[in-house]
């Protein structure tokens, strides 16, 4: 007879890849991941939103001077169009924008994910697709996974760049073709499209 103490316990049942496995697998086979996560997309939405918010917060020291430069450029153009605008009003506008930076960096990605999910859901309803609002948030979360990688690369660039004072546009930190265009002479629409 065998001793019951020598019989190993059965291996634990594995239902499939975990959430973080799916966040990596979405880069190579998004259809499989969506098929597995179509109904339970809430956790994926939260993980992606939190990761992007954390990356935005850690990139704040590098992105803040870029935002300041863009705001100063925009306010200078507004002041040129409206000579009645005083320097005090320009300073007040910059101060107000600086107060909004933390909200933009941390909450902005979650708002963008929610907005994209809403657009996917509405578009699906218009065309008769059987997509729930939860699965549309999952589609948005899966679509934003590459932005996590881009955020990590931006943060690493920020750490490795000794002088960021010459960077006046976020396109100069992008990993896309917009990096090679001069922000002073290129269209903002072209830069935004090439940063995607």
Image: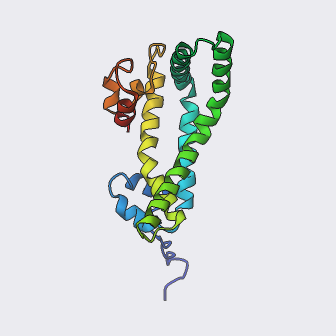
- The x and y percentages for residue 98 are 64, 24
Up-down relation of residue 144 to residue 77 (above or below):
below
Can the viewer see residue 188?
A: yes
Which colour assignment does the render follow?
A: rainbow
Counting every numbered tag in the picture gives: 0
Residue at the limit of the structure toward the bottom, as seen here: 1
Up-down relation of residue 64 to residue 29 (above or below):
above
Residue at (45, 30) in percent of width and height: 154
Residue 181 or 162: which is nearer the viewer? Answer: 181
Can the viewer see residue 20?
A: no
Up-down relation of residue 12 to residue 96 (above or below):
below
- The x and y percentages for residue 64 are 56, 23
Q: Which image quarter: residue 147? A: top left
- The x and y percentages for residue 136 are 49, 61
- The x and y percentages for residue 191 are 37, 30
Up-down relation of residue 76 to residue 118 (above or below):
above
Q: Report the side of 102 relative to 136 (left or right).
A: right
Q: Report the side of 14 relative to 86 (left or right).
A: left
Residue 110 or 28: which is nearer the viewer? Answer: 110
Residue at (68, 27) in percent of width and height: 99
Residue 82 or 45: which is nearer the viewer? Answer: 82
Residue at (53, 50) in percent of width and height: 115
Residue at (47, 66) in percent of width and height: 125
């Amino acid at each position: 007879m065998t001793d019951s103490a020598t019989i190993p316990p059965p291996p634990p049942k594995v239902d499939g890849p975990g959430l973080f496995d799916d966040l990596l697998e979405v880069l190579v086979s998004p259809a499989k991941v969506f098929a597995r996560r179509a109904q339970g997309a809430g956790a994926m939405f939260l993980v992606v939103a939190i990761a992007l918010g954390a990356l935005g917060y850690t990139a704040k020291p590098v992105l803040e001077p870029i935002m300041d430069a863009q705001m100063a450029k925009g306010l200078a153009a507004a002041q040129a169009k409206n000579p009645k605008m005083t320097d005090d009003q320009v300073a007040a506008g910059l101060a107000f924008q600086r107060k909004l930076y933390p909200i933009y960096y941390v909450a902005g990605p979650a708002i963008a994910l929610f907005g994209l999910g809403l657009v996917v859901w509405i578009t699906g309803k218009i065309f008769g697709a059987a997509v729930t609002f939860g699965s549309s948030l999952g589609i948005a979360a899966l679509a934003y996974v590459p932005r996590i990688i881009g955020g990590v690369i931006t943060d690493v660039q920020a750490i490795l760049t000794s002088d960021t004072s010459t960077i006046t546009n976020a396109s100069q930190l992008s990993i896309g073709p917009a990096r090679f265009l001069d922000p002073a002479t290129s269209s903002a629409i072209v830069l935004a499209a090439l940063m995607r």
